Image: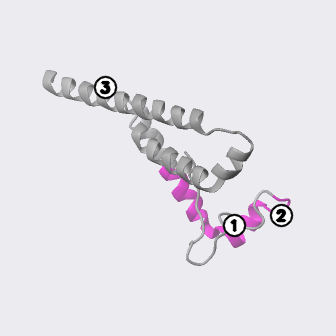
Amino acid sequence: MDLAYTYDTKKTSARIYPAYHTAFDTFDYASKYIDPGFTSHQTVARTAGNVLLRLSDSIILPLGARDYVELLENYYNEAEKQFLVNLNLHKISLEPLKTAINRYKTASETLEETIQNLKETDETES
């Protein structure tokens, strides 16, 4: 999980401010130019705190394993589209990666089903 404040993507493609992690990235610089009043810092800290509280109170972590499958499949399809010809020239196959994604997909579906069954069992026993 990566929590950060970023710039308005309609105005710039920058993800971080130019002095980030340089010798010029000081408390004074941040308080004067980057985040006066540290409101963005507070927002990120509060959001992270709320996420951590939710995670710590959960018997089963509320992370959707199936959601990650779609991302993996999109990355795979894009890699295949952009690099397949070059990979084939060098006799490199993406089949092991595709197999791993399919195995993860099956495992995530099984996990989601198990979690759902546990929730239903818990509801009927309560």
Pointer 3 with pointer 2, Cβ within 8 A? no
- Circle 1: residue type: Ser
Tell me which numbered mark, 3 or 2, is placed earlier along the sequence. Answer: 2
At x 65%, y 64%, the residue is 15
Amino acid on which disc 3 is placed: Thr
Name above or below for residue 66 compared with residue 124: below
Q: Is mark 1 on a helix, strand or loop?
A: helix
Q: Name the residue under label 3.
A: 114
Residue behind mark 1:
31
Residue plotted at (78% across, 56% down): 21
Query: Is residue 68 toward the left or the right of residue 112 in the image?
Result: right
Q: Which of 73 and 1 is in front in this view?
A: 73
Magenta stretch, residue numbers: 22-47
Q: Where is residue 79 in the image (x, y as percent from the top left)?
A: 60, 51
The N terminus sits in image quarter: top right
Instruction: Name above or below for residue 65 compared with residue 126.
Output: below
Q: Regarding mark 3 in the picture, which secondary structure is present there?
A: helix
Q: Magenta stretch containing residue 36, yes or no?
A: yes
Marks 3/2: CA distance?
51 Å
Q: Quadrant of residue 91?
A: top right
Q: What element carries label 2?
A: loop
Residue visible at 47% across and 40% down in the picture: 52
Q: Name the residue under label 2.
A: 24
Q: Where is residue 6 in the image (x, y as percent from the top left)?
A: 59, 64
Q: What is the x, y in percent for residue 120? A: 20, 28
- Depth check, mark 3 against mark 2: the one in front is 3
Residue 83 pos. (x, y %) = 66, 52
| Residue beneath the point at 55% across and 47% down | 76
